[in-house]
Image (tube, rainbow, N blue to C red):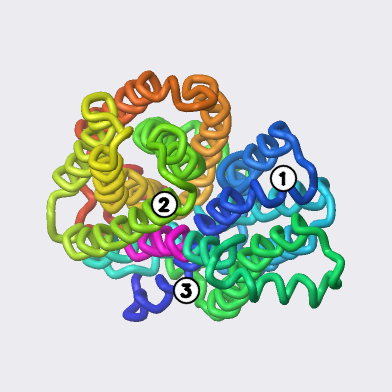
Amino acid sequence: MANSGSLKSTIAVSLTNYLDAGAIVAGASGLTLWKEYLGLTEMHLGWLNFISANCLGAAIGAIIGGFLADKYGRKFIFTYNLLVYMTGVLLIMFSMNFPMLLCGFLVTGISVGVGVPASWTYISESSEVNNRGRNICISQMSWGFGPMCILLFGMLFAPGGYLFSWVESVAHLFGGADMSTEAVNAFSSRIVFFTLFIVAFIAWNLQRQLQESAEFTAQQAEGKKTGLMDNIKVLFSNKIAVRTVIFLATIYLTWNLVASVMGFFQPHIYETAGGVSNEQANWMNCIQWFIIVAVTFVVSKLIDKSSHKLIYTFGLLVAIAAWLVIVTIGVNGMVGLWLFAILWGVQGGSSPQIFYALWGSELFPAKFRAGAQGLMFFIVRGLSAVWGLIFTYIYGENGEGFTIAAFCMIALLAISLIVGFLGVPNTRGRALEDITKERYGDNY
């Protein structure tokens, strides 16, 4: 039941992905500035990461938002959720102490989690049969634009950046002429978050004008109205649904354990293991995100016409090749470092996240489609939070455990490759209703 305006609605909903990835990178890029301004310890920074959009905050939000989207509709999420996001961003922007900053990170993270399953579900349900993969790729391109733009803003506004003199003027305008250097520097992070506030406001105005998903509306019209607990029970009691959750959670988790570490620690890894400056690390990271966006654009042209197994396998083979560079050539020299950055960028454009988002919305009935995705997102982001803490111990203070960490990453990516290769579903070019009927019968 797709409509001809799926591209327009996809772009509006995809801004949620920009805000998700943007919040993660904005939080990571400003940690040092907030640390110096508020006198925070490493433990404080650990808590900020743990409850942020990168980890626990998003995990909690996803499981709530997924089932709310199945209960009250996808439009319900779009109408209210970004108001919560903007509240969280405002808390960060005006933070004067650690509790305010922590609360802002948590509220923003929860909002990110609430929005993701509803967004992927809505995009699939509003897409034409032959454009579903393309539209999911557009949402992934938005996920790439977020970090790319935020990294650029971060470098322009950061102390020593081209626009830092303007940041100083704004800081003194609001805080007076006698502000400390640390307080002025923190204003660069406040302004970066302000750019997210602007995008969130635009996205909220676009999304609240969207029509409700036709599939959700049809389900409601047929009288298939159940409570949240009913949908949870059905999800866990249906063997096909349980097997699907296990399959998708496995391919996404094993890849995301690697990707989440790279998303938060990549500039730090480039600096400590690669020996480059902070500015060089940020530029390399920014260029890598550009590669991800470009490759995703190419994949968007192929995914509805070509073998999903081929694209999926290609992406993970490139991902494994990137980490093999570390254990063979190493990243101490610029050749190895750039080769790794380019390969990791290429894999990001055809990563399991694209197929998780696509298959996650295809392989479940509308009745608990968003709830199932929310549950899996909760599992993945929650375990990624724990893995992030474990990784820091393996990696060491100065990257002395990087080779061991690389072998761990290769093993995780190999699991994602094998499980995904064996379990690729036959969904390309088929209507969601047909897929649901084949898998679950006429009762859903």
Figure quadrant of the N terminus: bottom left
Q: Position of residue 19 (x, y in %)?
A: 54, 62
Horizontal side of 313 relative to 151 (left or right) equals: left
The span picked out in magenta is 137-149
Please state if 174 lies on the left or on the right of 238 as rendered. Answer: right
Residue pointed to by mark 1: 35
Q: Quadrant of residue 205?
A: bottom right
Among the 4 quarters of the image, the one containing residue 51 = top right
> Mark 1: which secondary structure?
helix
- Relative to the observer, which residue lies in front, 264 or 423? 264
Residue pictured at 34% horizontal, 53% vertical: 288
Compare marks 3 and 1 and give the one earlier in the sequence.
3
Residue matched to label 3: 12
Q: Which residue is mark 2?
A: 280
Give the residue drawn at x 40%, y 47%: 364
Report if residue 245 is visible in the image. no
Q: Amino acid at mark 2?
A: Gln
Looking at marks 1 and 2 on the same chain, the residue that comes earlier in the sequence is marked by 1
Residue 311 picture location, percent across and down? 18, 48
Amino acid on which the number 1 mark rests in the picture: Lys
Residue plotted at (13% across, 50% down): 307
Circles 3 and 1 in contact, beta carbons < 8 Å: no
Specify the label residue 399 is tagged with.
none
Q: Amino acid at mark 3?
A: Ala
Membership of 361 in magenta stretch: no
In the image, which is nearer the foreground, mark 1 or mark 2? Answer: 2
Q: Secondary structure at mark 3?
A: helix
What's the distance in space between the residues labelled 2 and 3, CA to CA? 33 Å
- Image coordinates of residue 82 in percent, x first then y, are 64, 66
